[in-house]
Image: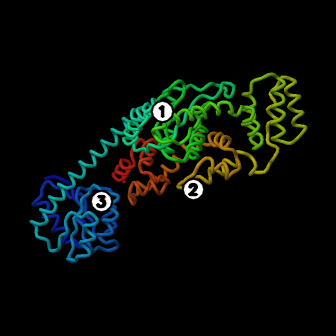
């Protein structure tokens, strides 16, 4: 029988004796490491990830039981055997509660030792096979997720009056069956410079942006609209999530309508209410002029100038808009006159689009930098773009534009990058489990953490931890 075993005991003669017995009686078993105290045993076992761990109870610094508590979370595939000089019921009870395969008392008979190690190796092989099956099942679910999501949306939109098909798809996806729909579609042509294209590429980008934030199922585009199902009773949360996602780069010209929260037998009504909300949103989309005036009010001269340049219309309209933006920026009649002179000469009044307020905390860029500093210090909190915007005194849309200009990323991407950077450091140390690391950096749902980590690094957290351990 082959396998890898790690030995931990503070008595060197015991270590040597056990090692000799293993080499003699189990020649195919590799001793991948030894330790004489609990802390070293934990660090080395996390790095080596043996099939079996043979652990003494009493060791300096950290007892065998304390070490096994840590290893149970960080190396769950390893099977422990406890070795002790004291046969105590309370110790044995706690040991078996920690998943110990066998409890051996020193001096241990070699036949019992070999029998225990052989049994533990068999258990470890079964445990690893089960873990592999679970990983395969998760990977299969992830690979088929888009098809399952489209099945859920089709069942809902085609009228599953009793909700049975919806329930089956929702169960396969791990979603609830009471919720609401959102309809993501193009903004009116007059409200944006380029009309958005609703295609499979946008569907995929929308799926990635949404699943990072909230449980949902994203369907294929239908009649220039992407349907999305959100389980759960909180419509307000869904409205805020959709609004936050649409402020990210790549979704310019897209708006969303969110319907009522209804039970599965009323999915047609829920979808109809989402379409109605989309139509109302299409008639109330802010214009480029409004965005430019907002930028000017926040002291963001470059953004105001860029939005003014994108304005369409006759010379009089553009002159009036430029004058209004410059007045909001500078509150200076001479600056407004400068705009009129420049435009009458056929020139762009670029020099007038400069904030007249010299206070370091006034401009949008300074407020965005304040927001970035806050994110750096509170990345593990449940942050939202709305909360940040309110904290620094900017609108959500304007803060999103300025953050993108400063970082080259959306707020979501920037926050994820910070969180995953801290998660990588924590995983490399090997002192916390994947679940504990995810919670420490702000991901309370391990599945979300795993998806976000793999999207950022190309590896799952477990794969990264194993690689980092080997390199260390």
**3 vs 2, front mark:** 2
Q: Could you tell me how far apart the alpha carbons at marks 3 and 1 are, in whole angstroms? A: 40 Å
- Residue marked by disc 1: 204
- How many callouts does the rendering have? 3
Q: Which mark is residue 390?
A: none
Q: Secondary structure at mark 1?
A: helix
Q: Earlier in the sequence, mark 1 or mark 2?
A: 1
Q: Position of residue 116 (x, y in %)?
A: 15, 63
Quarter where residue 192 is shown: top right
Q: CA distance from mark 3 to mark 2?
A: 33 Å
Instruction: Please say which color scheme the image uses.
Output: rainbow
On screen, residue 423 versus residue 26, left or right, reads right
Vertical side of 23 occupied by 196: above or below: above
Do callouts 3 and 1 mark residues in contact (Cβ within 8 Å)? no
The picture quadrant where one finds residue 31 is: bottom left
Q: Which residue is mark 2?
A: 378
Q: Secondary structure at mark 2?
A: loop
Between 403 and 196, the one nearer to me in the picture = 196
Q: Compute the Cα span from label 1 to label 2.
A: 29 Å
Residue at 77%, 42% in the rendered image = 297
Q: Position of residue 13 (x, y in %)?
A: 19, 72
Are dots 1 and 2 in contact, CB under 8 Å? no
Which is more N-terminal, label 2 or label 3?
3
Residue 45: numbered disc: 3
Q: Earlier in the sequence, mark 3 or mark 1?
A: 3
Q: Is residue 155 left or right of residue 59?
A: right
Q: Quadrant of residue 340?
A: top right
- 68 horizontally vs 403: left or right: left
Residue lying at 49% horizontally and 42% vertically, measured from the top left: 179
Q: Secondary structure at mark 3?
A: helix
């Amino acid at each position: 029988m082959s396998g890898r075993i790690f030995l931990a005991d503070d008595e060197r003669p015991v270590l040597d004796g056990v090692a000799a017995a293993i080499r003699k009686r189990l020649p195919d078993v590799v001793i991948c490491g030894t330790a004489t105290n609990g802390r070293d045993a934990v660090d080395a076992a996390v790095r080596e990830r043996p099939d079996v761990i043979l652990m003494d109870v009493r060791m300096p610094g950290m007892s065998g039981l304390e070490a096994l508590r840590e290893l149970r979370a960080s190396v769950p595939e390893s099977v422990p055997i406890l070795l002790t000089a004291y046969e105590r019921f309370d110790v044995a009870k706690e040991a078996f509660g920690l998943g110990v395969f066998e409890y051996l008392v020193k001096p241990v008979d070699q036949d019992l030792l070999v029998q225990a190690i052989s049994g533990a190796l068999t258990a470890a092989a079964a445990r690893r096979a089960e873990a592999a099956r679970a990983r395969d099942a998760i990977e299969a679910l992830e690979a088929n997720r888009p098809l399952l999501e489209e099945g859920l949306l089709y069942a809902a939109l085609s009228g599953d009056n009793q909700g049975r098909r919806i329930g089956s798809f929702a169960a396969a996806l791990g979603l609830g069956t009471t919720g609401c729909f959102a309809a993501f579609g193009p903004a009116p042509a007059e409200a944006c410079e380029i009309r958005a294209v609703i295609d499979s590429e946008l569907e995929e980008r929308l799926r990635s942006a949404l699943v990072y934030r909230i449980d949902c199922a994203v369907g294929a585009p239908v009649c220039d609209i992407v349907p999305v199902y959100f389980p759960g009773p909180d419509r307000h949360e869904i409205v805020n999530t959709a609004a936050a996602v649409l402020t990210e780069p790549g979704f310019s010209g897209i708006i969303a309508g969110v319907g009522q929260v209804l039970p599965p037998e009323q999915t047609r009504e829920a979808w109809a209410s989402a379409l109605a909300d989309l139509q109302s949103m299409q008639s109330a989309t802010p214009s480029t002029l409004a965005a430019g005036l907002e930028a000017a009010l926040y002291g963001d001269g470059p953004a105001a100038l860029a939005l003014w340049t994108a304005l369409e219309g006759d010379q009089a309209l553009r002159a009036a808009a430029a004058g209004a933006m410059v007045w909001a920026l500078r509150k200076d009649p001479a600056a407004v006159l400068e705009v009129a002179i420049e435009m009458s000469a056929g020139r762009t009044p670029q020099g007038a689009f400069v904030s007249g307020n010299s206070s370091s905390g006034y401009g949008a860029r300074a407020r965005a930098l304040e927001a970035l500093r806050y994110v750096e210090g509170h990345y593990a909190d449940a942050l939202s773009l709305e909360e940040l915007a309110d904290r620094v005194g900017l609108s959500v849309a304007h803060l999103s534009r300025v953050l993108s200009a400063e970082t080259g990323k959306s707020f979501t991407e920037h926050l994820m990058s910070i969180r995953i950077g801290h998660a990588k450091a924590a995983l490399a140390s090997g002192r916390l489990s994947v679940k504990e690391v995810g919670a420490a950096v702000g991901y309370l749902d391990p599945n979300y953490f795993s998806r976000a980590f793999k999207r950022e690094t190309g590896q799952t957290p477990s794969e990264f931890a194993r690689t980092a351990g080997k390199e260390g």
